[in-house]
Image: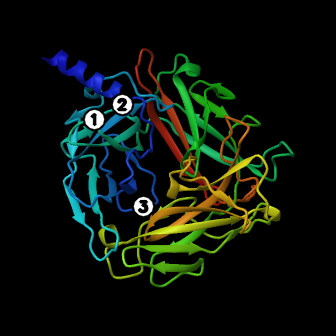
Amino acid sequence: MKYLLILLTVWICGSIEAQSPDSIYVPNIHSAQLYQRGNQLAYPVITLSGTQKLDLEFDDLDANVKNYFYTYQLCNADWTPVQLSSFDYIRGFAQNPITEYHYSSVALTRYTHYRALLPDQNSSIIHSGNYILKIFLDNDTSKLVFTKRFLVEENAATISAQFLQPLNPQLAQICQKLQFTVNGGSLVLINPFQQLKVVVLQNHRWDNAIYIDRPSFFSGNSFEYNSDDVPVFPGGKQWRWIDLESFRYQSDRVAKADYLPQSTSIFVKPDADRSRQAYYYYADYNGAYIIKTTESINPSWQGDYAQVKFSFVPPDNAPIPDQDIYLFGMLTGYKLNDETRLTFNAEKAVYEGSAFLKMGYYNYAYVTVNKNDPNAKASFEFTEGNHFETENDYLILVYYRSMGGRADQLVGMYSLNTLNSGQ
């Protein structure tokens, strides 16, 4: 019976391997968030055997009560699922119900708000690494609803880092470079080129993450990463913002609002091209958002939704040649698809798009993707511009695999901001 259970668990994990992290698979789910308890801007990271918790929240616009469950999938550094049974990284129940919910009130949009505090006391994680949180219906893993990434760290390696201006004169004014050292401590590194991997994130984004397999130099268990061109990131610009903390009192970025009996539409003032503008600093959320309101209501289940209309005025009021343009940020899940792509309105000479958003404060940007390059990534070059001085958050992740091990461990993590020292 034990072996049958193991085989069944491996089959279940294998059946959902094709699902990607940070994706929503049904149209009724909105405002799905996973963050460190009490801080919506904090990346979902917990320490192995620690006491930290993660808040999971989401809205179901079907507005009824459903039997939602969740489970964890351990992944390697590159987010490929490990070939292990869940018994190898979860102690306790592998699948758990979500029992806390509230029906919406006050809001015109009807929905059911769900919440869970993770990890559950009956389901602890016993292996560090990358994890995908999977939400599904009726205790049936084939009814996958959405997924979220999170990290479990163990403090086995130490990291020190600093920012440098790229030596390449073509990149010096528009990109940011990191130089850092990893001390493996007591890790057994017989073949460090195979056992050690490093991933660097800018503003907690995985779409432009830089993976580094080899250090520039190492001595003993100390590894230096100071290549001239890795890791180097385009700097971008401070993110645009829209204040939707109240639909009745319009913020200065709102052009107008249409209030209908059953819905609200909000029109954001047209956004101009910023690619040719000089950089200046103002505080932002580096692409993230916070669900909150200025009114005396609970934003979780009393905050309303609106269809928010965005428009971008391209250079010279003409379509950008060979480029698709997208609304971009955590509000769209950093996705580049038909829902986030803007269309050019020839009569108004602007790109237009929309997003269905809950009351809150949102950062966003416009990015382009080269239509003729199937491997092209999101670029700020034609819409926002890139600057070496831009304030950005960076996260350095160090992964280790023991000789004969079957899964990567997250053994070190270091966060730093271009304006402040790291930690």
- Badge 3 amino acid: Gln
Q: Are marks 2 and 1 in contact (CB under 8 Å)?
A: yes
Q: Residues within 10 Å of mark 1 (few under 14, many from 20)?
A: some
Q: Position of residue 137 (x, y in %)?
A: 25, 43
**Is the N terminus in the top left, top right, bottom left or bottom right quadrant?**
top left
> Residue placed at 77% from the left, 36% from the top?
228
Label 3 – label 1 distance at C-alpha = 27 Å
Lateral position of residue 183 relative to residue 29, left or right = right
Mark 2 crowdedness (10 Å alpha carbons): few <14, some 14-19, many ≥20: some
Mark 3 and mark 2 lie on one chain; the one further toward the N terminus is 2
Q: Earlier in the sequence, mark 2 or mark 1?
A: 2
Q: Amino acid at mark 1?
A: Thr
Q: Which residue is mark 3?
A: 40
Secondary structure type for disc 3:
loop
Q: Is residue 70 left or right of residue 212?
A: left
User: Residue 297, percent across and down?
Assistant: 32, 78
Task: Point out the residue furthest to the bottom here.
Answer: 249
User: Residue pushed farthest front?
Assistant: 347
Quick one: SS at disc 2? loop
Determine which of the numbered discs, if any, sits on residue 164 in the image.
Answer: none
Picture residue at 50% right of the left edge, 51% below the top: 333
What residue did someone put label 2 on?
A: 16
State the residue at coordinates (65%, 57%): 343
Q: Amino acid at mark 2?
A: Ile
Q: Which residue is mark 1?
A: 141
Q: Position of residue 418 (x, y in %)?
A: 65, 56
Compared with 228, 59 (above or below) is: below
Q: Residue at x 49, y 79 (%)?
A: 258
Q: Position of residue 249 (x, y in %)?
A: 48, 85
